[in-house]
Image (cartoon, helix red, strand yellow):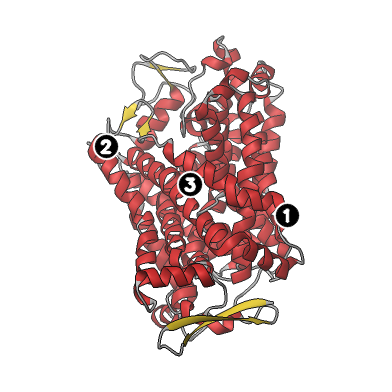
Amino acid sequence: MSFHTKWKQSGNGNQELSMEFRPRRATMLTQGADADQEPTRPTWSRQIEFTLAGIGCAVGLGNVWRFPYLCYRSGGGAFLVPYLLMLVVLGIPLLYMELTVGQYTRRGPVLALATVCPLLKGVGIASVAISFIMCTYYNVVITWALYYLFSSFQAPLPWQNCNNTWNTPNCTNHATNSSYSSTASQEFFKYKMLEQTSGVEDTGVLRWDLFLILILAWILIYFCIFKGVKSTGKVVYFTALFPYVILIALLINNTQLPGALEGIKFFIVPVWDELLSVEVWVNAAAQIFNSIGIGFGSLMAMSSYNDFNNNILKDTLSISIINSITSILAGFVIFSAFGYMSYLQGIPVSDLAVDGPGLVYVVYPQAFANMPVAQLWGVLFFFMLLCLGLDSEFAMVEVMVTSLMDQFYKDVIHIFKKKELFVLAVCFVACLFGIPCVMQVGIYVFQLMDHYTAIVSIMFLAFFEVMATCWIYGVKRLSANLEEMNGHKANIFFRLCWLIVAPVILIFSIIQFKPARYGEYVFPPWAQGVGWIIALASIIWIPLGAIHTLWVLPGSIMEVISKGQRSSLCTFHCPHLWKLC
């Protein structure tokens, strides 16, 4: 059974909400559907394609560099304790919630969350805005991977020695912590590929080679998704599975190198004192949150193409657990390489300097530059990064495409004639917005956008998403929807995590806000202000959506709010509220 609500005129002339039950899955789509919506929704050719696409979306570059970096900074194995705990109480429950909403409503995040809670329908719009902002600069990471991939066909590798035109007198062939020297791989990253300036104040010029590779990256994205889930489903068979082949091959190679065991010991032997640091726990929560992709709308959009009776819990456990296993596998690969580097330099693993993107584009190239057949390992490693980046990137683009097609199907088809041309237009616009990231100042623009989008904005967004779905719409109704699809309700563990644990963790993470920085460089106040504007570009839709709902519904603001509380202003199958979207 399901709820159906409608507005009617009472005897005293006031508007009231009436509610009635309708049979199983009472044609929510046909009630809300009109000429502007897609008449029939495609589904995955095989359900395994959604599972692989979800894994590909969740498993990305963050598993390869961010997880090992946070683990290293947090004392090695001690980080695994809060990380695994946050997986259980935060990652799995919130992913379960998102997949339930997406599959039940069979809509992208905008219409799905507007259906769940019109008062907070701006959360869905915000998730689309975040995904679009992220896809504009995230593809730059894929651009870097392509640049390194092409450079790996040279012999010797261009970051293998200091005998190049871009090297400085302070260049050394081995990693060092000295502030007066830099490695060959560091200088290749900074002075050859990026040609970076000294700060955000100096914009520099456009890096034309990076710009052309950026265009190539967007061409790859377009051909991955232009046919929708039918083409995406075929691509993920390769892009989701190939990285595991490379990671395992690299692990087998690395464990045979001298010193590798010391790096692995550092990774699995905990420093328990680090657990007393609040930052370690916050970092663990942030890593789970950003790695799985909760709040970005990608997985919700892809789950909307599922069969109505698909087993949601199975997909939830598959995606979240495989994502964490991948992070741990990458940890073994990276830390075995750290052990080898420490052996070459004669210093402890704890003294190696690693930070952010440098983990992938500085430390690891320096490691396999000293391996046998270095060019082969370079090609394999950066092709793996390309696959990891492509999976996450076309998931974010798919959010934008799905949401706009849901909302403006008739207008989109009228203007572009074919969906393929509309996808091309979205990719073209996103490519234009990515141009600042391939200028000489690009690394600072990238860091600023990433901090205020993937950390600041997403925490606010996720909090309101949990409020809309679990508090206002209600855990009972969400469990009833789950029972309608899969034949069973959510157990007490998921209900407690939805109602209490997740909101508390999100509030705590927001309180722990820190300004953006790149290494030792601290962004000036005006740049931090630009960062907040970037954050507001997505967050602002939450209050705007609430204002619009209160404006359109009849009655005063207090009457609308009180009616929403009494009759669940956030009930599925409400044709009147569908019009507000």
Locate the N terminus and report the quarter of the image it occupies. Answer: bottom right
Residue 204 makes an appearance in the image: no
Do the residues under discs 1 and 3 have CB atoms within 8 angstroms?
Answer: no
Name the residue at 42% across, 76% down: 580
- Answer with left or right where residue 317 lies relative to residue 526: right
Q: Which mark is residue 200?
A: 2
Of residues 349 and 285, which is closer to you in this image? 285
Give the mark nearest the N terminus, 2 or 1. Answer: 2
- Answer with left or right where residue 494 lies relative to residue 385: right
Q: Is residue 130 above or below residue 120?
A: above
The residue beneath circle 1 is 491
Choose mark 2 or mark 1, whichever is in front.
Answer: 1
Name the residue at 43% across, 77% down: 408
Q: Name the residue type under label 3.
A: Ile
Q: Residues within 10 Å of mark 1 (few under 14, many from 20)?
A: few
Residue 463: horizontal and vertical position, in percent? 49, 51
Choose mark 2 or mark 3, whichever is in front.
Answer: 2
Q: Residues within 10 Å of mark 2 (few under 14, many from 20)?
A: many
Name the residue at 27% across, 30% down: 198
Q: Residue furthest front?
A: 12
* Secondary structure of residue under mark 2: loop
Q: Residue furthest bottom?
A: 11
Q: Is residue 341 above or below residue 324?
A: above
- Answer with left or right where residue 414 lies relative to residue 25: left
Residue 183: horizontal and vertical position, in percent? 44, 21
Q: Name the residue type under label 1.
A: Asn
Q: Which mark is residue 142?
A: 3
Spatial CA span between label 1 and label 3: 40 Å
Give the mark nearest the N terminus, 1 or 3. Answer: 3
Name the residue at 34% across, 16% down: 169
* Secondary structure of residue under mark 1: loop
